Amino acid sequence: MSATDDRAGRATDTPSAKGGNVEGPTASAATAEGPGKASNASRGNAGGPILETRGIVKRFVKKLDLAGRIAARLGSSDRDVVVHAVDGVDLAIQPGEVVGLVGESGCGKSTLGRVIAGILPPTQGSVHYGGQDRATMSAREERDARLAVQMIFQDPFASLNPRHRVERIIAEAPLFHGLIDKAEARDFTQGIMRQVGLDPEFMRRYPHQFSGGQRSRIGIARALAVKPSFLVCDEAIAALDVSIQAQVLNLFMDLRADLDLTYLFISHDLGVVQHIADRVVIMYLGRVVEVAPADELFASANHPYAQALLAEVPRLDQRKRVFQPIKGEIPSPIDPPSGCHFHPRCPHAGPRCARDVPALKEIAPQRLAACHLNDGGVTV
Amino acid sequence: MTQAASGSTTSAAQASLTQPSVAQGASVKPSDAPTLEVEALATHFFTKSGVVRAVDGVSFEVRAGEILGLVGESGSGKSVSGFSILGLVDPPGRIVSGAIRFQGEDLVTATSERMRALRGNRIAMIFQDPMMTLNPVLRVDTQMIETVRAHTACSKAEAEDLALSALQQVGIPAPADRLRAYPHELSGGMRQRVAIAIAFLNKPDLIIADEPTTALDVTIQAQIIHEAQTLCRQTGTALIWITHDLAVVAAMADRVAVMYAGRIVETGTTDEVIDEPLHPYTKGLIGSVPSHNKRGERLAQIPGMTPSLTNLPPGCAFAPRCPSADVACAVEPEARELAPGRFVRCVHASAEEGLA
């Protein structure tokens, strides 16, 4: 099944799947196999991507309780609540690239990050690392592939175990996986701490003895300890003060140069993404609406949602501006709008937008957008 | 001096408690007298590990219809300044010195009855987390009607009409349905708009907004800034917008005050402060904002971190992180007025050097 076939298939079967129980590994196994290579070559990527997602779907199902099931059987309208967090995302990331993943809260960007990092299993679709599907790897290969993709979390307070000393937080994973032995642990930890700009003297301290900026450095050190080649940064600097944000952003850029890292940088802060990312992916309600090199996106966004989003970023050099907000709010992913998810808020929407799901199509080299305006208009 | 409630009856008693509030705020008065004047305010917290000088000699003023951006990082004392104005500082904290004059009336020495009459009526506050401002077990209409009837003698139906129009004003779709909703049934952006509607209900003369959009998405933030701007311009309400986000301030404020370690280090119009920052801390902050810099280049970071407020070293609090610090910085710098309304607390700052 090629990527485009996949999307067409999803568009038709999503409505029927909504009511039923769709959570489960069987669905992902069915789509895991398949010669998807051909369609991806047409993306115009040179060399193989380090990480690739194919048709990732993630749904969270809240099942009816017993009373609800009985009521449903007796004809009540209660059904399982299905949250369509991620709805068919194809994404290929080249080695050494920094990809910014942008969207409003509830658009599925964090869920996608967690699926890519292997923390959540996808409902459908597959994650390929180094060209190989993670679900079909041998146990050993899969372990290596998972270690190679590490995640840095938003909250530097909640993501560190308060009862562990820094040395244990950093060295636990590499010791467990046999990357280092006990004798080396001390030197190893000190080396990593120096690398992220922490004083190695502090290795016996607990997380609460550090400031927010230092704690996020500990989180970065922990991720780096297993020698990853790919980092998923989920709002990694959102909780920090502006001056500390700059320090951590600089650290990310230094590490990229020193260690040849590839980043998926998830953020709602477009200023930060513009600064650090080579390529930007914009999500809306579980779907990718636009992919473009950062310069081109910020110069001229194609999708109406991307345009509106960029227009609303407050910037230092724009004073006393009158904001022209997008009307409405992001709809609930429990019951997303038909057709193009953005159509109820879109200034250009026509009858076709409520009916057909727009495909993510190449509109220029390296640029993809999912909007009917690029493809025959909205009135057809 | 300290706790106002200690029975001082000077200015508080003179102002009568029953003001015809609704009529008063409605007209926009471009008066020269500032709505709020804060003078050498000091709020300290007396903890076991020492005195935390959260706010230490802060002075600023806001006029009717003006938006003042109060900018600073966490721990700079910007929120405590806001709480002090409303008399919301709890022990072990207290206002140790300074004056807060609201329309000429000193709030530091005001009785708690007088403060109750002002709060939610003439002075309103919008907090960062709307879930903390709204009572989770009361419907939106109950809370809004309560706010109106606490300060104005009117019937429930009249109060409900006011509530309905306030919700409409902040751009809430289907306001009649939302009135019947509980806070948990609303999204974050919607809740914050309800909080803003409640703040504007009695058409106050002063609103203190403490990081009201920090937890929200850009699109919702844009809507809320838009609504706050329009409401201020229409009703002539003075607005203090407390935030750590310089870009938000640049987009909406008339004047900016930058706080560091309990003091205001720089004040001026938005254009002056952002285009020609004079204090090294302001320069550092502006350099740290990613969108302002060229893509992919290293950001100009401020070394070190915000100092602990318990044992601030003598002299300039920013000196340990400052690139241009020298012996002169060992003495606490005074706020100097380099141009009308343009204050800087740095011995090295001069008006000519601004652009350099």
Image (cartoon, helix red, strand yellow):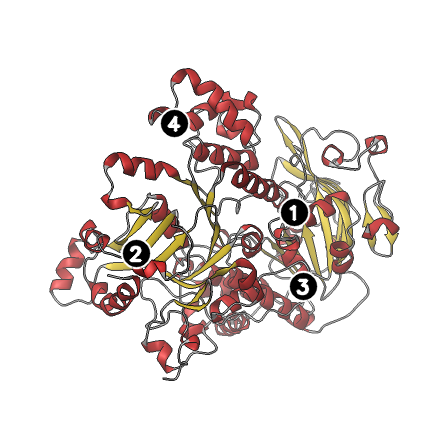
Amino acid type, residue under disc 4 in the picture: Pro
Establish if B169 lies above or below B299.
below
* Residue under pointer 4: A174
Which chain does the residue under circle 2 lie in? A
* Place of residue A253 in the rendered image (x, y in percent of width and height, measured from the top left): 56, 42
Establish if B27 lies above or below A182.
below
Query: In the depicted view, which residue is nearer to us: A359 or B100?
Result: A359
Give the number of the disc on residue B288.
1
Specify the quadrant of the image occupied by residue B2. top right
Q: Whole-Å distance between the Cαs marked 2 and 1?
A: 42 Å
Amino acid type, residue under disc 2 in the picture: Lys
Q: Whole-Å distance between the Cαs marked 4 and 3?
A: 48 Å
Instruction: Report if the CB atoms under discs 2 and 3 are less than 8 Å apart.
Output: no
Q: Quadrant of the N terminus of chain B?
A: top right
Amino acid type, residue under disc 1 in the picture: Ser
Give the number of the disc on residue A318.
3
Amino acid type, residue under disc 3 in the picture: Gln
Q: Quick check: do tags 2 and 1 share a chain?
A: no
Choose the circle earlier in sequence order: 4 or 3: 4
Specify the quadrant of the image occupied by residue B43. top right
* Residue under pointer 2: A37
Q: Quick check: do tags 1 and 3 share a chain?
A: no
Query: In the depicted view, which residue is nearer to us: A160 or B1?
Result: A160
Tell me the SS state at disc 1.
helix
Choose the circle earlier in sequence order: 2 or 3: 2
Give the number of the disc on residue B201.
none
Tell me the SS state at disc 3.
loop
Q: Is residue B138 left or right of residue A334?
A: right
Tell me the SS state at disc 4.
helix
Q: Quick check: do tags 2 and 4 share a chain?
A: yes
